[in-house]
């Protein structure tokens, strides 16, 4: 059996026509009931008047005959009365004496003279009629001063009144049904037209959840009047503002990246300049005492170590900041290079950086964004750590995710910065020092489908954890 649809989830274009149809049905039922009641009252009043007229004429005709015991005259009076009142459609007329014995009847075979009629007592005059019934009855007591000389009982055919009532009922049902259907369709058309701007806005807002916000077409905005037109223009203004904000944030993030690169280049220049002095001294020594074997050996070893250190430093920096290289998998060497990159800043702050590298083999995740995100966290941790403390980086593959954590012993990451990092705050930092590095880290991790968590251990400091899911077999062609 199919799943029952929840009426609360129905669109308003369905709810309103159904509500209109339900209200029209209620109104139709009430009006039909009122019309049928008035019809029944009119039929009863009209029939009562005709029956009274019939009984008046018959009473004046049969009363003298009953007093004279002239039965045949009573029969003749009944026949004349029925002939004169054909529109009333008398079905049966019976005249009895006071004891209920038949004196004359319109159908003598069914009610022979002298037979007893079992019927309710008649006190003066009575009339009985049920709306929709096929017959109606009327009776009148004929009184002579001091005694009852006879009773006239008449039955009338009312099938034509019942048919009229049925015709009216059918006409009411059909009219109400047609009007209900017409108004329901009209309600659907009106509501669908009224809800079209809402549907357009809802579609654009729904698309904004899946991708970037798209403005409403200018033709639609120009064609829409009133409050919805103003709403469309406000929405397009919001989209434009968000796009400008995003562009500004991207430019500031790039400037922050270039600024970090400049500071790192300055530190690298200092790191390179230090061994250069020793290397020039080694060259001078070689020029002066190159004929001695131990001098050549020591000087060449110093030159080799210095050049290797400079080469590794330059290669690591180039691998991190060049954007024209093809994407490649994350390796253990990529993690180890981070220590070399933060060493100048760590040395300036007298902070020790330790790395627990748990990568035994390459991980099928792009190395550049992961290294950039972790480098931002390490630089923030070194900046927050007090002198003489330690910043710890741990990297491991846990099941279907790559997990990285950076721990420092600083005063703790402020709540606004933590909200930016974990994504609880949607405010893009636009001021200097407003947390662009953390915002960039959040974006890099989010683009990889990962999550960021911030913890503050009871021992102090901050632990920032990254969890990046490993690609599935379907995603592997898109990785690297």
Image: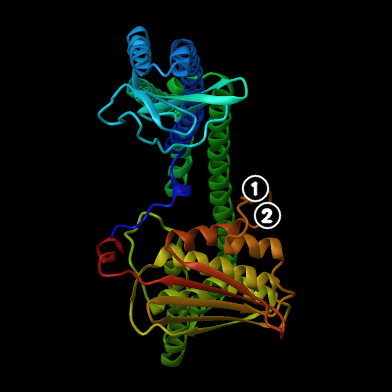
Is 261 placed left or right of 2 in the picture? right
Is 75 placed left or right of 355 in the picture? left
Nearer to me, 69 or 209: 69
Q: Residue at horizontal 29%, vertical 64%?
A: 475
Q: Looking at the image, do the residues carrying marks 2 and 1 touch, with CB atoms under 8 Å apart?
A: yes
Q: Quadrant of residue 335?
A: bottom left
Label 1 CA crowd tier, 10 Å (few <14, some 14–19, many 20+): some
Is 157 placed left or right of 240 in the picture? left
The residue carrying mark 1 is 430
Nearer to me, 348 or 198: 198
Location of residue 304 in the rendering, given as x and y in whole percent from the top left corner: 42, 80
The residue carrying mark 2 is 434
Q: Secondary structure at mark 1?
A: loop
Residue 440 lies, with reference to residue 57, above or below; the image says below
* Camera sees residue 125: no
Q: Tally the marks.
A: 2
Location of residue 55 in the rendering, given as x and y in whole percent from the top left corner: 47, 16
Nearer to me, 28 or 87: 87
């Amino acid at each position: 059996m199919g799943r029952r649809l929840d009426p609360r989830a129905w669109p308003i274009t369905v709810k309103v026509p159904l509500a209109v149809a339900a209200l029209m049905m209620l109104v139709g039922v009430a009006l039909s009931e009122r019309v049928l009641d008035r019809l029944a009252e009119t039929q009863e009043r009209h029939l009562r008047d005709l029956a009274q007229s019939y009984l008046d004429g018959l009473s004046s005709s049969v009363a003298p005959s009953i007093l004279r015991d002239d039965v045949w005259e009573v029969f003749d009076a009944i026949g004349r009365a029925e002939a004169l009142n054909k529109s009333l459609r008398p079905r049966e007329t019976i005249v009895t004496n006071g004891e209920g014995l038949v004196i004359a009847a319109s159908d003598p075979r069914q009610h022979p003279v002298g037979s007893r009629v079992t019927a309710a007592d008649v006190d003066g005059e009575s009339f009985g009629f049920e709306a929709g019934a096929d017959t109606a009855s009327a009776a009148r007591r004929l009184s002579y001063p001091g005694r009852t000389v006879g009773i006239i009982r008449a039955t009338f055919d009312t099938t034509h009144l019942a048919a009229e009532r049925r015709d009216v009922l059918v006409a009411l049902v059909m009219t109400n049904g047609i009007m209900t259907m017409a108004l329901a369709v009209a309600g659907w058309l009106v509501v669908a037209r009224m809800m079209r701007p809402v549907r357009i806005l809802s579609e654009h807002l729904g698309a904004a959840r899946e991708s970037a916000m798209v403005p409403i077409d200018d033709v639609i905005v120009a064609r829409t009047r009133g409050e919805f037109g103003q709403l469309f223009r406000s929405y397009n203004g919001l989209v434009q503002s968000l796009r400008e904000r995003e562009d500004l944030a991207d430019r500031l993030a790039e400037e922050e990246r270039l600024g970090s690169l400049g500071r790192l280049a300055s530190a690298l220049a200092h790191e390179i300049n230090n061994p250069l002095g020793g290397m020039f001294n080694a060259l001078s020594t070689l020029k002066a005492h190159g004929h001695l074997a131990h001098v050549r050996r020591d000087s060449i070893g110093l030159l080799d170590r210095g050049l290797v250190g400079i080469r590794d430093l330059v290669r690591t920096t180039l691998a991190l900041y060049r954007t024209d290289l093809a994407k490649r998998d994350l390796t253990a060497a990529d993690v180890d290079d981070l220590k070399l990159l933060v060493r100048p800043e760590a040395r300036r702050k007298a902070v020790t950086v330790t790395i627990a590298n748990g990568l035994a083999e390459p991980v099928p995740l792009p190395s550049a964004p992961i290294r950039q995100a972790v480098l931002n966290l390490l630089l923030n941790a070194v900046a927050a750590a007090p002198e003489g403390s330690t910043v710890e980086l741990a990297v491991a593959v846990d099941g279907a995710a790559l997990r990285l954590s950076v721990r420092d012993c600083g005063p703790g990451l402020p709540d606004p910065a933590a909200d930016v990092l974990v994504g609880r705050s949607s405010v893009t930092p636009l001021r200097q020092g407003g947390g662009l590095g953390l915002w960039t880290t959040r974006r890099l991790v989010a683009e990889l489908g990962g999550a960021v968590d911030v913890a503050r251990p009871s021992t102090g400091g901050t632990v920032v954890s990254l969890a990046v899911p490993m690609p599935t077999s379907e995603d592997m062609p898109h990785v690297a």
